[in-house]
Each structure stands twice: as C-alpha cells, then as structure tokens.
Image (tube, rainbow, N blue to C red):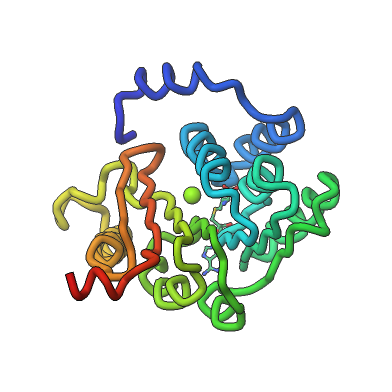
Amino acid sequence: MIVDQRLVTYINSLDKGNTPFLNELEMKALRDYVPIIRRETQSLLKMLLQLKRPSRILEVGTAVGFSALLMYTYGPEDCQITTIENYEKRIPIARENFRKAGAEKRITLLEGDAQEVLKTLEGPYDFIFMDAAKGQYIHFFPEILRLLDKGGLLVSDNVLQGGDIIESHFAVERRNRTIYKRMREYLSVLKNSEELETAILPLGDGVALSVKKEQQEENHEG
Ligand code: SAH
Ligand code: MG
C-alpha cells in the first residue's frame, strides 16, 4: 500500500461504482485471485477516457478482460480495443466475458507473448494501457512508443510495486530484485524520453501517465 489505507478507503467510498455486469466480473476475479486494476485506477481510467475520447485503444495484459470491458463500457461508443494476453488459462475466460458483454465486435483479443505480438501491430493507437508482467515493460517500450500516436496517452500500471520500488537491493526478496530494477529503468526511460511527457502518480499500485508530444522538433530547437 503506497498511500494510507484509510485515505484510499475514503476516496473509494466516494466512487459511484460501475455497471452491475462489471461489479460481478470484478467480484469473480477477486475471488479467483485474478489480478485486476484497483478501484482508484478504474476511476482514473474512466476520467482519462472522457478526457481523451480515444478511437483506438491497445491494452497489454487482458487477464479475464475486466479492464478491457471497463474501457469498452466507459470509452467512446465507436472505439476499438485490442488487448493482448499470453496465459492460456485466462484467454477462454476473457473471450467468454467479451461474448457475454456483447463486446466481440469492438474488442479484439490477441493471443501470445506481447513481446512478439506488439511487433505485428500497426499503429497508431491514441490510448495504450500497459498492465502485464512488470519486468517486461522496459522490453515492450520501443514497440509501444512506435505504436503510440502523437498526442496519444500511455497509462502504465503497477509501476511503484506497492511502494517497494525504492527499497534497497538487500531489503528486497531475490526474485523481485530484477523486476524492481527493470521497473526503475522503465520509469527513468519514461521520464527522460524526448518524445514523452510523463507524470508518475502514487495511485493504486503506482501509475505512470505519459503523453507523446505533438511537437518534438520545437522542443529540441528551443
Ligand atoms: N488488465 C487486467 C489485468 C491484467 S493482469 C485487468 O485489470 O483486468 C496481467 C496479465 O498480463 C496477466 O493475465 C498475465 O498473464 C499477462 N501477461 C504478463 N506478461 C505477458 C506477456 N509478455 N504477454 C502477454 N500477456 C502477458
Ligand atoms: Mg495490474
């Protein structure tokens, strides 16, 4: 927990919530230990969708389709969503959830390792939601940057690892060390990229918001 739990509980208590379909899906996912975006992150995504009104959304990390269906429900009516998942057990569940929601025409689920799948995609996407294996964001980044439209928004979830990302190498469990190191590298790349403007929010499990600049050349000359 990055922020005081009582504060998070209070903030979430103000939320008017989602549709019954999404509520049920969320409950089921939590019951089955499927990792899905937190309430605070859901609220942020919904606000960003209103602000940005994207027409093409790309998601990396479908799980059982909760966040894809949240974006489907609260995004523009005509927007297309492409989402990538490589865990065979979750793919049929996600497909079934998309079918139940009547969302198959607007959500395309691509099966496979995002590292490979991303290479095959054609941009531009004006909204990208990165929510897959934390240690891989840095490897996905070149393709993500290629696929992101100018003025497009990249939302990266779980970037602060419950706050543990700032712990010393030795305080961190061995298996997490590489993940944290790569995540710090990723955040550094996001913040230092000439092509992006990035803000890191201690919201949920840590969210980075990056916009691809429209006028990069002017910034170089200026
Ligand atoms: N966005 C979902 C939760 C995603 S959990 C939601 O909020 O509803 C992260 C998912 O990313 C997991 O299901 C995991 O199997 C998948 N994943 C991790 N690494 C991946 C990779 N390299 N390629 C494709 N999917 C990956
Ligand atoms: Mg996540």
201 vs 171, left or right, is: right
154 vs 54, left or right, is: left
Tell me what residue is drawn at x 52 percent, y 37 percent: 47
Tell me what residue is drawn at x 30 percent, y 48 percent: 200
Q: Position of residue 24 (x, y in %)?
A: 72, 32
Quarter of the picture holding the C terminus: bottom left
Q: Position of residue 11 (x, y in %)?
A: 43, 21
219 vs 121, left or right, is: left
Quarter of the picture holding the N terminus: top left
Depicted 33 relative to depicted 148: above or below? above
Q: Position of residue 185 (x, y in %)?
A: 25, 66
Depicted 193 relative to depicted 102: above or below? below
Given residues 109 and 124, the one toward you in this image is: 124
Tell me what residue is drawn at x 38 percent, y 47 percent: 207
Depicted 141 relative to depicted 79: above or below? below
- Kindly indicate the quadrant of the structure image that contains residue 9: top left
Given residues 21 and 164, the one toward you in this image is: 21
Tell me what residue is drawn at x 33 percent, y 64 percent: 196
How many numbered discs, if any?
Answer: 0
Given residues 85 and 221, the one toward you in this image is: 221
- Kindly indicate the quadrant of the structure image that contains residue 87: bottom right
